[in-house]
Amino acid sequence: CVRWLAACDGEPTRRLQSAVLVLLAAATISSFSSPINQEWLVSGRDRIWWNFKQRSDLSLLRDTAQRVRALYDPSDRPELLTQDAYLAVESGLQVPAALILGPFSYFPDMPTERARRLHVTNRELMIDLLRRTDAPVAAFSGYGLAIAAPEIIEIPEEEQARLWGVLRERYEFYLDVPDFGQAHTTLRILRRRYDPGSARQASEPE
């Protein structure tokens, strides 16, 4: 392309401007055929029929964020136990410092002191976090408690079950949100258990 432009007659600046406009037009036209556009509208396929989404991913995120935020009292700590950081951002809540890397914050075999220094979790710190956090609500999609860094591999099923078992010691199921996030997995929302004598009691999911 550069050689062709150099061989053309006319002012070099004008030739470059023309080339940029042509490339921009080609990129714009080709973007309409991108498979990303299709992902905005459909959610999977049933044989030869596409399943069209009832709402956009952003609309679902905003609605879910509102439902999560509604579970908090003014006196609650504004923290959401999650590895889906964009849900916390949309809810106006914070995530635990050790989970700021989202699904890539779990380094199961990293030495504890190094994990603390790097603000991530290892197996020991993750279990401790699940047992001690004061976050009123927990929310985990298919990415949550499922990816081991730095290899970015799936955590063995028995270890996933162990982490979920620790989480359920203090949290109880509230609501499932299907087709959530960029991978359209199920988001599981849980509420922290309260003492029977507490004025606030967990409600049933809608």
Image: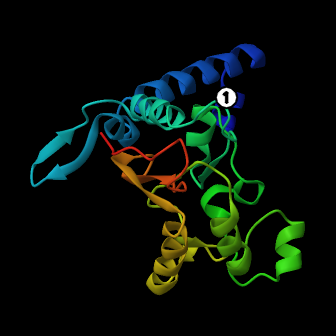
Q: Secondary structure at mark 1?
A: helix
Q: Is residue 3 left or right of residue 53?
A: right
| Quarter of the N terminus within the rendering | top right
- Give how far across and how far down residue 142 sits, in percent: 44, 61
Residue 44: image x %, image y %?
A: 24, 50
Seen as rendered, the residue at the extreme front is: 197
Taking 109 as reference, is 206 above or below it?
above
Quadrant housing residue 40: top left
Residue 98: which quarter of the image? bottom right
- Quarter occupied by residue 16: top right
Closer to us: 21 or 111 = 111
Out of 116 and 180, give the one closest to the viewer: 116
- The residue that appears at 46% across and 79% down in the rendered structure is 161
Q: Quadrant of the C terminus?
A: top left
66 is higher (above) or lower (below) than 149? above
Type of amino acid at the residue the image marks with label 1:
Leu
Relative horizontal placement of residue 18, taking residue 26 as reference (left or right): right
* Picture coordinates of residue 119, whole percent (x, y): 82, 62
Front-most of residues 13 and 47: 47
**Residue located 45% across and 34% down the image:** 67
Q: Is residue 11 left or right of residue 69?
A: right
Position of residue 68 measured from the top left corner of the image (x, y, whole percent) = 49, 38
Left or right side of 105 for 166: left
Q: Residue furthest left?
A: 48
Task: Give the vertical position of 41 relative to 197 (above or below).
Answer: above
The residue that mark 1 highlights is 5
